[in-house]
Image: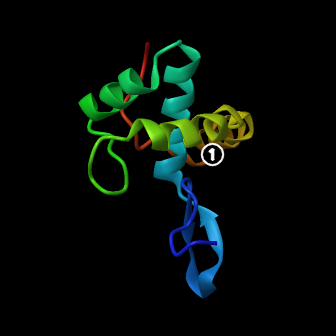
Amino acid sequence: MSRFPPYGRQLAAGGQLEADVAELAVLEAIATLSAGGLSLRVTSAALATRGVLARNGRPFAVSTLSRLVPKSRGLQLFREVFAVKIAIWGVTSPLPHVGH
């Protein structure tokens, strides 16, 4: 592993990786925008318009999004788990609504 955890994960106590709910919500938004047929450049702009930026505080680079899109498409399990959390604990997405 590099010194930075993979996007969607964070370091927990003891150096273990755990889910980063905010970043998983961003991956969900990327998947939604990608499924809508938006280009990576337009996806980056749409996220930035909503105040969703990369870890460095800038809009997502196209090269970064190109690595995250395959990851975001595999989030069906996350969607199901997040729906259960909403039902049980009333957890809501930390990301503003992202539509096409």
Asked if 90 appears above or below 15 in the picture, the reply is above
Residue at the image position 61 percent from the left and 37 percent from the top: 72
- Farthest residue in the bottom direction? 14
Q: Is residue 92 shown to the viewer in this render?
A: no
Q: Is residue 80 shown to the viewer in this render?
A: yes
Query: Secondary structure under badge 1?
Result: helix
Asked if 82 appears above or below 47 in the picture, the reply is below
Q: Nearer the viewer, residue 27 or 56?
A: 56
Display coloring: rainbow
The type of residue carrying mark 1 is Lys
- Which quadrant is home to the N terminus? bottom right
On the image, the x and y values in percent for residue 26 come to: 47, 40
Q: Nearer the viewer, residue 20 or 91?
A: 20
In the displayed structure image, the side of residue 41 where residue 78 appears, left or right:
right
- Which quadrant is home to the C terminus? top left
Residue at the image position 57 percent from the left and 42 percent from the top: 67
- Farthest residue in the front direction? 63
Q: Nearer the viewer, residue 84 or 12?
A: 12
Q: Quadrant of residue 95?
A: top left
In the displayed structure image, the side of residue 86 where residue 40 appears, left or right:
left
In the displayed structure image, the side of residue 6 where residue 45 appears, left or right:
left
The residue singled out by tag 1 in the image is 85
Residue at the image position 46 percent from the left and 50 percent from the top: 22
On the image, the x and y values in percent for residue 6 come to: 58, 60
Residue at the image position 42 percent from the left and 35 percent from the top: 62
Q: Nearer the viewer, residue 49 or 39?
A: 39
**Other residues around mark 1 within 10 Å, as few (<14) / some (14–19) / many (≥20):** few
On the image, the x and y values in percent for residue 83 come to: 64, 36
On the image, the x and y values in percent for residue 57 come to: 27, 53
Asked if 84 appears above or below 35 in the picture, the reply is below
Asked if 97 appears above or below 3 in the picture, the reply is above
